[in-house]
Amino acid sequence: MERKIIKIDQEKCNGCGLCAAACHEGAIGMVEGKARLLREDYCDGLGDCLPACPTGAITFEVREAPAYDAAAVEAAKKAKAAAPLPCGCPGSQSRSIQRTPCAGHTAPSVPAGAEESQLSQWPVQIKLVPVKAPYFEGAKLLVAADCTAYAYAAFHRDFIRGRITLVGCPKLDEGDYADKLTEILRVNDIKSVTVVRMEVPCCGGLENAVKRALQNCGKLIPWQVTVISTDGRILDL
């Protein structure tokens, strides 16, 4: 059939991934650092991705394309949310990390003068963390872009301490985080959400995913966003 569908100009695409995060149907994905229309039958032609693109790489065109398949989109969303963790890998086993703070004393394995890790659970990757875990109950949630911990020197002290930490990169990770984050917020007693992202455009995908999860989880959860500059400063936006 002939219908309206999006077109992505590969020359204009800067690989930020914002369109993939804005596409609720999962029609757009990142391939070799560029946005691609992966499933024509997942594109509803409404264009939620258009305003997300900072370079104007996405436009509409009318051409021969498969009809929009709403049932397939919904089934794909449910399958993605229910996808099990990778099996057989010790690194994906979910567990809490207990730390006993003691004034003026660090763990024996921490060199003198060094700060002790504040991480309180494993795994931390959004793609690997389970939807429901004991450490989520009553938790303050930190959702951070991968690069922030490298750019901001006191990341453990100022952000990880006292929070359950989830990290990801919307540009490099395949797919969207919004569905999984929605389920995490929906089935657990999350007290607050802190988003820490870099100032670069591609990090906007992480913030957008959290925003959509907060809108769709059916709860009112306080949240805040902190933006880190590429030279390691907290930006006052």
Image: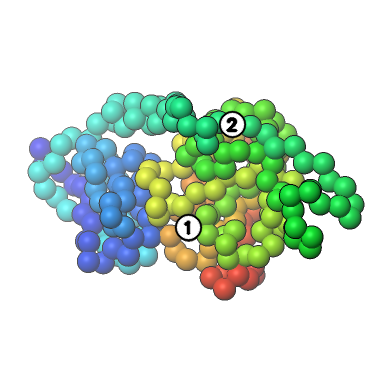
Q: Residues within 10 Å of mark 1 (few under 14, many from 20)?
A: many
Residue at which label 2 appears: 94
Residue displayed at 57% across by 39% down: 123
Q: From the viewer's perspective, is residue 13 above or below residue 101?
A: below
Question: What residue appears at the point 24 percent right and 44 percent down from the top-left corner?
Answer: 38
Question: Left or right: 222 with respect to 69?
Answer: right
Q: Quadrant of residue 43?
A: top left
Tell me whether circle 2 and circle 1 mark residues in contact (CB < 8 Å): no
| Residue 108 image point, x, y percent | 78, 48
SS at mark 1 in the image: helix
Residue where numbered disc 1 is placed: 204
> Residue 3: x, y in percent?
15, 43
Instruction: Using the image as rendered, state which of residue 67 and residue 84 is in the foreground.
Output: 84
Q: Residue at x 41, y 43 (%)?
A: 176
Q: Is residue 38 visible?
A: yes
Residue type at numbered disc 2:
Ser
- Dot 2: what SS? loop
Question: CA separation, marks 2 and 1?
Answer: 28 Å
